[in-house]
Amino acid sequence: QVQLVESGGGLVQPGGSLRLSCAASGSIFRINHMGWYRQAPGKQRELVAGISTAGSTRYADSVKGRFTISRNNAQNTVYLQMNSLEPEDTAVYYCTAGQYLGAYLGRGTQVTVSS
């Protein structure tokens, strides 16, 4: 099993920035990919960004150019720097890790973008 704990969510005004962090523990050897999903009220969960052990990244079209994913393999952590936040980014953000994205999920952290 892999345990994931997110931090860094909160309330921010449109145009602002937040940085999410996620620390992994447990069966770390199972982790190849790390990333972030989000789910807004009434919507399906969507993949926001992912990063492989080698550093290859992928992003949802809606966040390209605004969000940046990074990871520290030595500390088993993944980060999501979110800039130019929009009200549409409001959601619960879930950290994910494992041999594939979605294998394990954290409990989530709320991000609210509102004036």
Image (cartoon, rainbow, N blue to C red):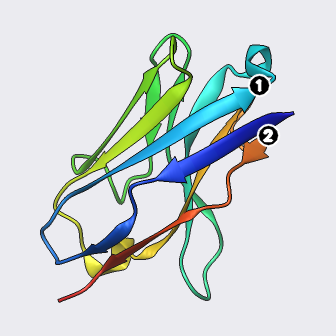
Q: If the image is split into quadrants, where does the C terminus sit?
A: bottom left
Picture layout, residue 94 above or below residue 40: above
- Of residue 47 and residue 74, the one placed in the foreground of this image is 74
User: Mark 1 sits on what residue?
Assistant: 99
Residue ranking furthest to the right: 1
Q: Residues within 10 Å of mark 2 (few under 14, many from 20)?
A: some
Picture layout, residue 30 above or below residue 49: above
> Dot 2 lies on which element?
loop
What label sits on residue 103 in the rendered view?
2
Give percent across and percent down for residue 22. Answer: 52, 41
Residue ranking furthest to the left: 15
Give the residue at x 56% y 35%: 23
Give the residue at x 16% y 61%: 84
Report if the CB atoms under discs 1 and 2 are less than 8 Å apart: yes
**Amino acid under disc 1:** Gln
Q: If the image is split into quadrants, where does the N terminus sit?
A: top right
Give percent across and percent down for residue 11. Answer: 30, 76
> Dot 1 lies on which element?
loop
Q: Is residue 19 left or right of residue 93?
A: left
Q: Quadrant of residue 9?
A: bottom left
Q: Quadrant of residue 96?
A: top right
